[in-house]
Amino acid sequence: MPPVSGEYESFLADVAEAVAQHVAPWRARIAEAIAQWSAAGYAVGVLERAMQLPKEPDVDGLLATFAAAAEHLASLERVALAADPALAGQPVFKDPARVAEAEDATARAVAAVSPPPGPEAALTRDAFEVGESNQGAAAVADEAVATPGVRHALLVIHGPSGVGKTHLAHAVANDLVNASGGALVAACVTGEAFAGELVAALQAGGVERWRARYRAVDALVLDDLQGVADKERTQQELVALLDDLAAAGKQVVATLDRPPEGVPGLAPELRQRLERATVVAVDVPDRALRERLYARALAPRHPGLDADLLRFLAERPVRSARDVAAIAARLTAAAEVADVPLTLRLTQTELGTAARVAEAKAAGVVDAFFLDAEKVVWDWPDVSARVSEEHR
């Protein structure tokens, strides 16, 4: 005769107690965690698999890691939903085994709403003149475009101000975007702006969104990276970002005003990553490069330039390509004021005046106000008079 209902229930309770006495305490702890996290809607496959292990794992570490992953997923979900409410209820945000997928989904959502600034369209590879002073850097940049995120995954370009570092870095980003048909996302930011964005994100409680914004890019240009020097928190975030982008096979180009080992105020972790990168230099323009730069700068307003004029300009040392552009603009203005073609004689006169002004200022001969290049007259009352005399 079968036992009555009450007796049967008592029998089951006795069996359960006997089983519990023989179940390892660590399994009981994991079972309790499974019940807790399942009730909160999280996938607990990781914990269930741990229950099947033949011997006790590091239960404290396992449960702490699971809890941290769940907390991180909750934070990612808040950021993702703020950017795209349609992501509500996505299972990827409830599975600690899929944290990487959740980070990627969040990054894409944030980038779609507020993408970082991209490269300047005018700074193309075709517009970058190559000479002995920059040909090594240009060649490596071309290799980075051919195989992004591989051999030169982190490319560091260093050199003095105005020699074309920014141009070359933006050219890499532009080429990558164009090669992808516009599908690739490239971001360009200065070190100072990067640090400023982090401060703003910390103040607004939006660090996760800020992180996701940059991890969503396919290529990143960090211009004038020395701007993060002495900023400890910024450098910590930057190291983590560089590691994540490297792990994802993405391309990074950084520019510095000197070699990485010579930049003061860099944290050891960041310095190590920059020194291990592909490091190339861009120097002041050589003579042949100066001639090509002057030809490019002057040709649009002065077609058919005299070769002797270009040779004369090229013989004059300059500190940077920026100086070439400034001199070209000065000569163009002088010719347009006089309403005459730009000639070698006008160029020699105009630059000779500028040189005498600079020498007088350096010697402290006269108050700098009276030696302003736009006010002083050495040879003739004005540019027009000088040119008129030249053409008589």
Image (spheres, helix red, strand yellow):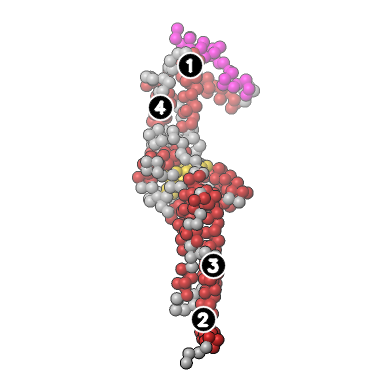
Amino acid type of disc 2?
Ala
Q: Going from the N terminus, do you reach mark 1 or mark 4 first?
A: 4
Q: Which residue is mark 1?
A: 336
The 10 Å Cα crowd at callout 1, few under 14, some 14 to 19, many 20 or more, is some
Q: Which mark is residue 39?
A: 3
For the residue pair 204 and 363, the one nearer the viewer reads as: 204
Work out whether residue 247 or residue 82 is closer to the camera in this orientation and state it. 82
Instruction: Report, in whole angstroms, how far the alpha carbon at label 3 lies from the one at label 4.
Output: 69 Å
Name the disc covering residue 170, or none. none
Tell which tag, 1 or 3, sits nearer the viewer.
Answer: 3
Of label 4 and label 2, which has the lower sequence position? 2
* Residue located beneath label 4 in the image: 296
Where does the image place residue 148, in percent across and percent down from the top left?
38, 47
Cα separation between marks 3 and 2: 23 Å
Name the amino acid, label 3: Ala
Q: Residues within 10 Å of mark 4 (few under 14, many from 20)?
A: some
- Dot 1 or dot 2, earlier in sequence: 2
* Secondary structure under the numbered disc 2 in the rendered image: loop
Q: State the SS at label 3.
A: helix
Mark closer to the observer (1, 2): 2
User: Of the residues tagged 3 and 2, which is closer to the observer?
Assistant: 3
In the picture, the disc for residue 24 is 2
CA distance separating discs 1 and 4: 18 Å
Q: Is residue 287 above or below residue 193?
A: above
Q: Quadrant of the C terminus?
A: top left
Q: Nearer the viewer, mark 4 or mark 2?
A: 2
- In this rendering, the label closer to the viewer, 3 or 4: 3
